[in-house]
Image (tube, grey):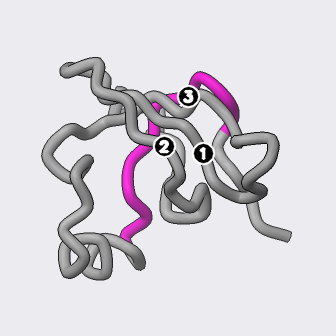
């Protein structure tokens, strides 16, 4: 079972996706951590994210690219 982040949690890229994300030059890479707002209802497994520092909204990215920050990272 795929474990998704909880809504309103701080997230980062999964280590296994970090290299792929850099190769695609996703716009949120320099805006970490992100706040995960939840899944888009009519786009299963895609979410809405907001840059913690910038407040920019990023939507439509696969939720499984992200994991929650650990207690030590917060």
The residue that label 1 is drawn on is 47
Q: From the image, which quarter does the C terminus lie in? A: top left
Choose between 29 and 5: the one closer to the eye: 29
Q: Which residue is mark 3?
A: 9
Q: Judge the density around disc 2: few (<14), some (14-19), many (≥20) Cα neighbours within 10 Å.
A: some
Closest to the observer, 27 or 72 = 27
The answer to the question of whether label 3 and label 2 lie on touching residues, with beta carbons closer than 8 A, is: no
Can residue 20 be found in the magenta stretch?
Answer: no
- Quarter containing the N terminus: bottom right
Residue found 77% across the figure and 67% down from its top:
2
Closer to us: 68 or 31: 31
Q: Residue furthest left?
A: 30
36 sits left or right of 56 in the view: right
Judging depth in this view, the residue of 6 and 26 nearest the camera is 26
Task: Give the residue displayed 77% in from the left and 56% down from the top.
Answer: 44
Could you tell me which residue is drawn at 60 percent across and 45 percent down? 47
Q: Earlier in the sequence, mark 3 or mark 1?
A: 3
Image marks 1 and 2: residues in contact by CB distance under 8 Å = yes
Q: Is residue 10 rendered magenta in the image? A: yes
Which of disc 2 and disc 3 is earlier in sequence?
3
Indicate the secondary structure of the residue bearing disc 2.
Answer: strand
**What segment carries the magenta color?**
6-15
Q: Residues within 10 Å of mark 3 (few under 14, many from 20)?
A: some
Residue furthest right as drawn: 1
Does 47 sit left or right of 28 as displayed? Answer: right
Number of numbered discs visible in the structure rendering: 3
Q: Residue at x 59, y 22 (%)?
A: 8
Q: Which residue is mark 2?
A: 59
Q: Tag 3, which secondary structure?
A: strand
| Image coordinates for residue 38, horizontal then vertical, percent | 67, 34
């Amino acid at each position: 079972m795929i474990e998704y982040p909880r809504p309103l949690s701080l997230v980062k890229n999964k280590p296994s996706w970090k290299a792929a994300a850099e190769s695609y030059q996703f716009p949120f890479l320099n805006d970490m951590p992100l706040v995960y707002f939840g899944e888009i209802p009519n786009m299963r497994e895609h979410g809405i994210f907001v840059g913690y520092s910038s407040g920019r909204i990023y939507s439509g990215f696969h939720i499984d690219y992200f994991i929650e920050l650990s207690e030590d990272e917060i």
